[in-house]
Image: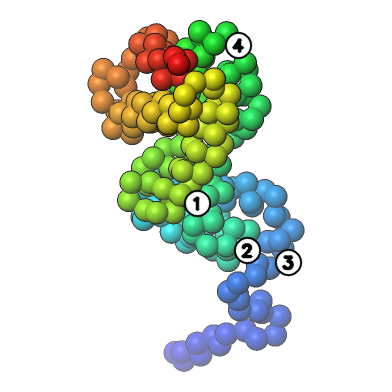
Amino acid sequence: MTEEPEPTPATDGAPAPRRRGRPSRKAASEGPDARTRILEAARTEFAERGYDKTSIRGIAKAAGVDAALVHHYFGTKDEVFAAAVEVTFEPALVLPAVLGGDPDGLGERLARFFLSVWEDPGTRTPLLAILRSAVTHEAAANVLRDFVLRRLLERIAAELDVPDPTLRAELAASHMLGIAMLRYVVRAEPLASADPEDIVAMVAPTLQRYLGEG
């Protein structure tokens, strides 16, 4: 019995080797869907693993794309992180309603708005990524500062008719972020299982004191 020769790699008609860097024309044509999958995968990876343990390759695998496509759309890991944690609501559309009502109810409205963001799985995931990563990595801390300070606190402080409005807004933010850390990250009981409305009722007077008293 004679042994058949081992097959040699095909050359004619074989696909060209995959190159690093710019994605193929086919991948680019699938851009919008692929970009959405990458963002969703990145949010999940960063939220579950934190910044340090998340890799571009891991995000690409979870999204079902090549790592080169992640780099093509978002660049570095820091840039992917910043894009991934952009929450799915725009504070500019919500804060006027929170800040524009009766001044005596500002603390309650702000507490309810804050908890509603965290109770929504769509916005909780990227925020978890920020909190879990910000304590150990500067890129995540920068994103947290940018989101909390520029997109939220500066807008709140601008509407307050009290002394030291920026300091008061930061104190309110520190109070709410502490609740978020214990309830959604550490999951400390009984806070983790408490009814959101019960939390609002307890927290609102403190926020009102920060933001509404001269």
Q: With 189 as the anchor, is 130 left or right in this view?
A: right
Badge 3 or badge 4: first in the primary sequence: 3
Query: Pointer 2: what residue?
Result: 72
Check contact, mark 3 vs mark 4: CB within 8 A. Answer: no
Residues 124 and 45: in front is 124
Query: Pointer 3: what residue?
Result: 25
Residue lying at the far left in this picture: please name it: 189
Which marked residue is nearer to the observer: mark 2 or mark 3?
2
Residue plotted at (54% across, 27% down): 156
Query: Pointer 4: what residue?
Result: 101
Q: With 28 as the anchor, is 201 left or right in this view?
A: left
Q: Amino acid at mark 1?
A: Phe
Which marked residue is nearer to the observer: mark 4 or mark 1?
4
Badge 1 or badge 3: first in the primary sequence: 3
Badge 4 or badge 1: first in the primary sequence: 1
Q: CA distance from mark 4 to mark 1?
A: 35 Å
Q: CA distance from mark 2 to mark 3?
A: 12 Å
Q: Amino acid at mark 2?
A: His
Image coordinates for residue 152, horizontal then vertical, percent: 54, 32
Q: CA distance from mark 1 to mark 3?
A: 25 Å
Please rate how many residues cluster around mark 4, counting C-alpha atoms within 10 Å: few if below 14, some from 14 to 19, many from 20. Answer: few
Residue plotted at (65% across, 67% down): 23
